[in-house]
């Protein structure tokens, strides 16, 4: 009986400690960039000499970056005649290659299919993402359905 009373008293005392913590001190500083990030996909063109390679045009805008940043592009295409066959690939640029100076930048990235060759005239899904960890918001993306053409 005495153990039950001690356990009840201890549980009651600890319940008061479980109240949510309140922040003390100044609020955290806002993110350095309030202009945000913008990214827009352009054309996706199949390399005529290497049909497993596509060139993706991307334009992006981000402000000055003191933190990690990246540009990633991925393309996925299902064979319209064979539902089990899917071409896909992605490409990511090193953060040192991403210019974030508040002006619109144009880039072309090569995306190599990891499985089968790209099919001209067939629909594909293209996605471009720019991230800039020090900005608000920290990333932006554009995605769309495109018909691949041979360039």
Image (cartoon, rainbow, N blue to C red):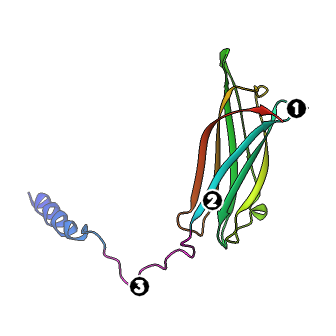
Residue sitting at 41 percent across and 80 percent down? Answer: 27
The Cα–Cα distance between marks 1 and 3, rounded to whole angstroms, is 59 Å
Q: Are marks 1 and 2 in contact (CB under 8 Å)?
A: no
Identify residue for label 3: 26
* Residue 104 rendering spot, x and y as whole percentages: 70, 64
* 18 relative to 94, above or below: below
Q: Are marks 1 and 3 in contact (CB under 8 Å)?
A: no
Q: Please tell me how crowded label 3 is: few (under 14), some (14-19), or many (20+) other residues with Cα within 10 Å.
A: few
* Residue 103 rendering spot, x and y as whole percentages: 70, 68
Choose between 83 and 106: the one closer to the eye: 106
Specify start and end residues of the magenta stretch as a single range: 22-35
Is disc 1 placed on a helix, strand or loop?
Answer: loop
- Residue 121 lies in quadrant: top right
* Residue 127 rendering spot, x and y as whole percentages: 64, 44
Is disc 2 placed on a helix, strand or loop?
Answer: strand
Q: Quadrant of the N terminus?
A: bottom left
Question: Magenta span has 27?
Answer: yes
Identify residue for label 2: 131
């Amino acid at each position: 009986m005495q153990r039950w009373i001690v356990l009840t008293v201890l549980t009651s005392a600890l319940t008061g400690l479980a109240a949510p913590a309140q922040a003390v001190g100044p609020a955290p500083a806002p993110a350095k960039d309030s202009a945000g990030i913008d990214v827009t996909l352009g054309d996706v063109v199949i390399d005529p000499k290497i049909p497993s390679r596509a060139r993706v045009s991307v334009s992006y805008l981000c402000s000055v970056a003191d933190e990690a940043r990246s540009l990633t592009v991925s393309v996925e295409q299902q064979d319209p005649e064979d539902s089990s066959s899917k071409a896909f690939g992605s490409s990511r640029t090193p953060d040192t290659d991403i210019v974030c100076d508040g002006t619109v930048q144009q880039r072309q990235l090569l995306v190599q299919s990891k499985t089968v060759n790209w099919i001209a005239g067939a629909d594909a899904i293209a996605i471009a993402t720019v991230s800039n960890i020090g900005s608000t918001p920290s990333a932006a993306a554009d995605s769309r359905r495109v018909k691949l053409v041979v360039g």
